[in-house]
């Protein structure tokens, strides 16, 4: 923040009201001091053999008031609880002898040998829980343990395993075995309005088609520049994941593309990996609109899958990748040059739970570079001028608001907007990530 911003109180510019949309992957890495204190109480109570007190304190640790994701009630010598993960609800109880939790995935309407064989094989990959069939013919994932073995550490990883697996498998299994399964326990999901679904579908289709058209135009030789194609593909994969936040088949497809490209044991060439990613994107483009629409809903979450990292990890990523932009810019590949900052931002948000102010800055990058999309979703603040160039005043104001919002918890956070270039989106993106790199 410059001295002029401080003198004239620009950092206090209020942000206009914004629609309540979720972007990116939920993370449980941003726990408050009170939540960490609850975990300590849980661990202490467990050591003292106050097992039910330990379970209650642990549930307090898991709870996220903004999500309203965890509920529990103690009745005598039993603690009843439920928690939510995307489309699934985990219910359980703990008494003086045992703790048991379960989550229904789908109802079995027709016996299917392939499905049951699949679930049996999947059991071998589970460390704490197991798939089973309950008395109501529902495919269920179950975890149980003696309460004297239900330490907070074990509970966290066991409940996380079953919650994440249940949330992912219900959509995937319903998609693959639609004639043998039917949905169950989805009444807690908040529907997304049809206009919002239409905006997201258009975004997905337009961006995939635009990339395919560019690669078909002959401006870039994929065989000669496989790294450039990879930047374009991965930028799009992460952009779709963060901005659309799909569930089910689309989410799994985006995760699969990430895994395929970065698989260490895969000795295939970058060209071959690019071709596989293009095939996956083509399949997303050709899916029926109603199939994609069913994967868009507002759920609650308790566990995240992104890895908590420090600002230094983000700075290293920027430092390693951003210099590659110069060659593509100097040699007439502006589309690829623009994709490199997008790849960096998307990779960080897809893989890491970065510090909150860093996350806010990366979200602002998307607000600027995908302004039309945000306006269609009902956001009003504009970050581009009428000529499509980044708007200096609104961007500086937004950065200053982020600093003010996080100054107490992150006093070291100090992005310097004085070096930002607003000439065009490419120069802005490059200088913006340089600013992010040095903000910590």
Image (spheres, helix red, strand yellow):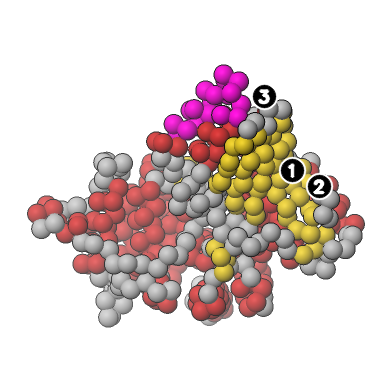
State yes or no: discs 1 and 2 in contact (Cβ < 8 Å): yes
Q: Dot 3, how many residues are within 10 Å of its Cα: few (below 14), some (14-19), or many (20+)?
A: some
Quadrant into which the C terminus falls? top left
Q: Is residue 142 left or right of residue 1?
A: right
Label 1, secondary structure: give it.
strand
Mark 3 lies on residue:
148
Going 24% across and 67% down the picture, which residue do you hit? 394
Residue 365 is covered by the magenta coloring:
no
Residue 106 position by quadrant: bottom right
For marks 3 and 2 on the same chain, the one whose residue lies earlier in the sequence:
2
Q: Which residue is mark 1?
A: 142
Judging by the rendered image, the residue that carries numbered circle 2 is: 132
Question: Count the marks: how many?
Answer: 3
Q: Does residue 88 appear in this view?
A: yes
Give the percent coordinates (x, y) of residue 122.
Answer: 78, 47
What separation in Å lies between label 1 and label 3 (alpha carbons)?
18 Å
What whole-number distance in Å separates the C-alpha atoms at marks 1 and 2?
Answer: 7 Å
| Quadrant in which residue 205 is drawn | bottom right
Mark 1 / mark 3, whichever is N-terminal: 1
Observer able to see residue 165: no
Local packing at callout 2 (Cα closer than 10 Å; few below 14, some 14-19, many 20+) is some
Circle 2: element type: strand
**What's drawn in magenta, residue-wise?**
36-53
């Amino acid at each position: 923040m410059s001295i002029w911003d401080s003198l004239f109180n620009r950092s206090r510019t209020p942000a206009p009201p914004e629609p309540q949309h979720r972007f990116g992957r939920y993370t449980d890495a941003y726990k408050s001091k009170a939540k960490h204190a609850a975990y300590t109480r849980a661990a202490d109570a467990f050591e003292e053999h106050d097992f039910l007190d330990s379970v209650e304190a642990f549930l307090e640790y898991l709870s996220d008031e903004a999500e309203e994701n965890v509920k529990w009630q103690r009745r005598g010598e039993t603690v009843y609880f439920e928690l939510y993960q995307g489309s699934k609800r985990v219910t359980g109880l703990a008494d003086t002898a045992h703790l048991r939790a379960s989550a229904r995935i789908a109802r079995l309407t027709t016996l299917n040998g392939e499905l049951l064989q699949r679930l049996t094989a999947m059991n071998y990959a589970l460390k704490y829980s197991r798939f089973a069939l309950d008395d109501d013919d529902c495919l269920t994932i179950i975890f149980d343990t003696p309460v004297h073995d239900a330490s907070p550490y074990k509970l966290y990883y066991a409940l996380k395993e079953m919650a994440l697996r249940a949330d992912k498998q219900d959509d995937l299994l319903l998609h693959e075995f639609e004639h043998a399964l039917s949905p169950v326990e989805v009444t807690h999901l908040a529907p997304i309005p049809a206009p919002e679904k239409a905006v997201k579908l258009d975004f997905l289709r337009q961006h995939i088609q635009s990339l395919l058209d560019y690669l078909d135009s002959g401006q870039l030789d994929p065989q000669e520049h496989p790294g450039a194609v990879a930047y374009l593909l991965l930028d799009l994969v992460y952009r779709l994941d963060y901005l659309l936040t799909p569930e089910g088949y689309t989410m799994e497809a985006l995760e699969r593309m990430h895994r395929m490209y970065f698989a260490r044991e895969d000795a295939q060439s970058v060209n071959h990996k690019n071709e596989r990613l293009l095939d996956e994107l083509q399949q997303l483009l050709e899916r029926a609109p109603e199939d994609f629409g069913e994967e868009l809903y507002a759920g609650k979450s308790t566990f995240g899958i992104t890895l908590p990292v420090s600002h230094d990890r983000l700075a290293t990523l920027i430092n390693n990748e951003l210099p590659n932009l110069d060659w593509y810019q100097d040699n007439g590949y502006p589309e690829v040059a623009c994709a490199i900052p997008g790849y960096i931002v998307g990779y960080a948000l897809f893989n890491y739970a970065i510090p909150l102010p860093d996350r806010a800055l990366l979200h602002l990058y998307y607000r600027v570079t995908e302004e039309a999309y945000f306006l269609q979703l009902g956001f009003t603040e504009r970050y581009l001028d009428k000529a499509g160039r980044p708007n200096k005043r609104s961007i500086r104001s937004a950065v200053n608001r982020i600093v003010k919002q996080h100054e107490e918890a992150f006093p070291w956070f100090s992005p310097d907007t004085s070096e930002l270039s607003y000439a065009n989106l490419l120069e802005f993106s490059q200088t913006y990530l340089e600013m992010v790199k040095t903000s910590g």
